[in-house]
Image (tube, rainbow, N blue to C red):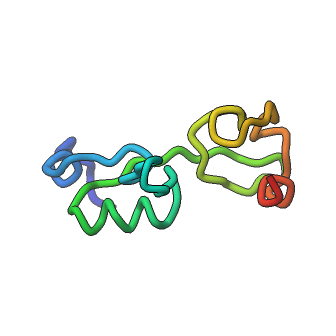
Amino acid sequence: MGRYSGDLTWLTARPIAHRGYHDMNNEVWENTLSAFDRAIEKNFSIECDLQLANDGVPVVFHDDDLSRLCGLKDDVRLLTSQELAMK
């Protein structure tokens, strides 16, 4: 295995779309395939947030709870991936 050179130009040479290239006014929700597709189309790097649901399944979600996007006070880490899919 090669040694890490510390060179991050491959990542920083382009703008970074935090949570994808999202726009709530045009109904492109953050951290969705649509937001990631838009970022790729615009040649942006993508940064996303991963959390583990209660059943150990990784989920892409920025906040600790569902209040900002879903209006619910549920903590992402206390719900299973199936429960999150139903929200």
Residue at 77% x, 39% y is 77
Front residue (pair 71, 75) = 71
Front residue (pair 23, 40) = 23
Pinpoint residue 60: horizontal percent, then vertical percent: 59, 52
Position of residue 26 relative to residue 33, above or below, is above
Residue at 49% x, 66% y is 33
Circle count:
0
Pinpoint residue 49: horizontal percent, then vertical percent: 53, 44
Residue at 13% x, 49% y is 13
Q: Is residue 52 left or right of residue 43?
A: right
Front residue (pair 61, 12) = 61
Q: Quadrant of residue 43?
A: bottom left
Q: Is residue 10 left or right of residue 56?
A: left
Position of residue 38 relative to residue 52, above or below, is below
Q: Is residue 11 left or right of residue 33?
A: left
Front residue (pair 26, 17) = 26
Quarter of the rendering occupied by the N terminus: bottom left
Position of residue 44 relative to residue 8, above or below, is below
Residue at 71% x, 47% y is 52
The furthest residue to the front? 25
Pinpoint residue 65: horizontal percent, then vertical percent: 71, 33
Pinpoint residue 47: horizontal percent, then vertical percent: 40, 48
